[in-house]
Image (cartoon, grey):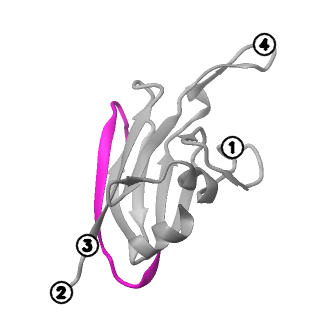
Amino acid sequence: MTNNIIISCHVDTTDAVAALGLEVWVDDQKHFDTDHVQTAETISIELIDDESDHELRFVMKNKTPAHTVINEAGDIISDARLIVSDLTFEEIKLGHVFVKIATYTHDCNGTQTSVVEPFYGELGCNGIVSLKFSTPIYLWLLEHM
C-alpha cells in the first residue's frame, strides 16, 4: 500500500484586475493552471510518498509592462505581483525553509538576462519558483527544519 502526502499553499495577487497567470507543477505534472489570479485561493496537491526526488514549481505568466506603473524618476508606483504563502507539506508549514531553499528564475520580463534569486514570497516577473524536495516527506522535513 502506498501513502500519499498533501502539499498545499495559498496564492493571491496584489492586483485583481491584472490578468496574471499561474501554473503549479510537481515534476512533469501540472496541478493548477489559470490565466487570471483574481482572489486568494488555496491549492492542494496529492502526491505519492515514495522514495523519489521531486520539484515543486510555481510559474508566473502573462505579466506585461502595463502591469507596472513607474513615475518620471523611475520609481515603481504600483506593481502587479503574485503572492505564494503558507506552503505546507502534510499540514506542516515550511515557513523559513521555503525561503531558504526555493529559487526564483526570471529575466525581468525580457528586459535583462536570466537570473536565479532567492524567493521571498512574491513573483513580480514572469518566471519560475522552484523548490526541490524528496520523499518520504517526513525524512526530508527532519533534514531541513
Q: Which residue is mark 4?
A: 72
At mark 2, the secondary structure is loop
**Circle 2 residue:** 1
Q: Dot 1 corresponds to which residue?
A: 108
What is the x, y in percent for residue 104?
62, 53
- Image quarter (top left, top right, bottom left or bottom right) of the N terminus: bottom left
Amino acid found under the numbered disc labelled 3: Asn
Q: Secondary structure at mark 3?
A: strand
Q: Farthest residue to the top: give it.
A: 72
Q: Residue at x 60, y 43 (%)?
A: 120
Magenta range is 35-55
User: Is 25 covered by the magenta stretch?
Assistant: no
Q: Position of residue 99 (x, y in %)?
A: 59, 50
Q: Is residue 124 left or right of residue 62?
A: right
Crowding at mark 2 (Cα within 10 Å: few <14, some 14-19, many 20+)? few
Dot 1 lies on which element? loop
Marks 4/2: CA–CA distance: 62 Å
Sequence order check, earlier mark of 3 and 4: 3
| Disc 3 residue crowd, few under 14, some 14–19, many 20+, Cα 10 Å | some
- In this rendering, the answer to whether 27 lies above or below 64 is below
Residue bearing mark 3: 4
Mark 3 to mark 1: distance in Å?
A: 37 Å
Is 52 magenta? The answer is yes
Tell me which residue sits at (55%, 60%) in the image: 130
Q: Is residue 107 visible?
A: yes
The residue drawn where x is 40% and y is 35% is 12
Estimate the spatial distance between the alpha carbons at disc 1 and disc 2, rounded to whole Å. 45 Å
Residue 28 visible in image = no
Disc 3 versus disc 1: nearer the observer: 3
